Amino acid sequence: MQSFLFLTASTREPGHTGNTETLARAAAAALPADMPQRWIALAQCDLPAFVDLRHTTGSYPPPAGDAATLLDATLTASDIVFVSPVYWFSVPSPLKTYLDQWSAWMRVPGVDFKARMAGKRLWVVATSGDRAKAQPMFDSYRLCAEFLGMQWMGALWGKGGAPEAVLEDATALEAAISYFKAG
């Protein structure tokens, strides 16, 4: 069964919706009304810093707390959407912390994370001042998808900046309507 997991990576204060989430919600509004959607604000999750045990312990204990919630949500979804503003030409820190957990989850006995991620679809919604400067971040996400055998669905990009700037980007708002229909 198809379901969407939207992982918002903005570090704006709670209660303040940024341009990237505004664009993502416009795209999500075009999904069928009965399509399951789950939205998780990564900045509000308490994720542990990743400690690389690959060459010492070799495995990781099952995650707890918010990390366990995110693992379950990730494995349950057929489609994962990174709602990722561009910060300093790169991945926002809440999303980077989440991605680092993937390295641990691949080594939790019995989870079979890499095999269970294969075939899922990875989408990215982003805003920034300049599309070309977002490309390194998009390339990073595409490589993550390829490593896990996920389908890279490309990026929906809009003009960011001050709050609600994306609402002036008619091209991005029009693209949002059909973005999830690409799959």
Image (cartoon, rainbow, N blue to C red):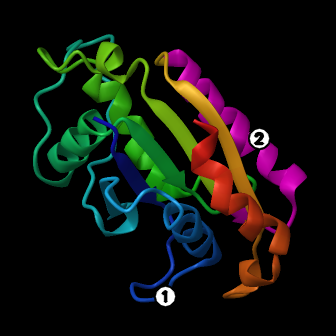
Q: Amino acid at mark 1?
A: His
Single out the mark in the foreground, 2 or 1. Answer: 1
Look at mark 1 in the image and give the residue it sits on. 16
Q: Main secondary structure of the magenta part?
A: helix
Left or right? Give the position of 79 relative to 155: left
Look at mark 2 in the image and give the residue it sits on. 136
| Residue count near mark 2 (Cα–Cα under 10 Å), binned few <14, some 14–19, many ≥20 | some
Residue at (74% x, 59% y) in the render: 175
Q: Secondary structure at mark 1?
A: loop
**Screen quadrant of the C terminus:** top right
Q: Position of residue 1 (x, y in %)?
A: 27, 35
In the displayed structure, 82 sits above or below 14; it is: above
Residue at (80% x, 44% y) in the render: 135
Camera-side residue of 83 and 180: 180
Q: Give the quarter of the image for residue 106.
A: top left
How far is the residue under mark 2 from the one under mark 1? 27 Å
Does residue 140 show up magenta in the picture? yes
| Marks 2 and 1 close (CB-CB < 8 Å) | no
| Residue count near mark 1 (Cα–Cα under 10 Å), binned few <14, some 14–19, many ≥20 | few
Q: Position of residue 163 (x, y in %)?
A: 67, 88
Would you say residue 126 is visible in this rendering? no
* Residue stretch rendered in magenta on the structure: 127-147
Q: Give the quarter of the image for residue 56.
A: top left
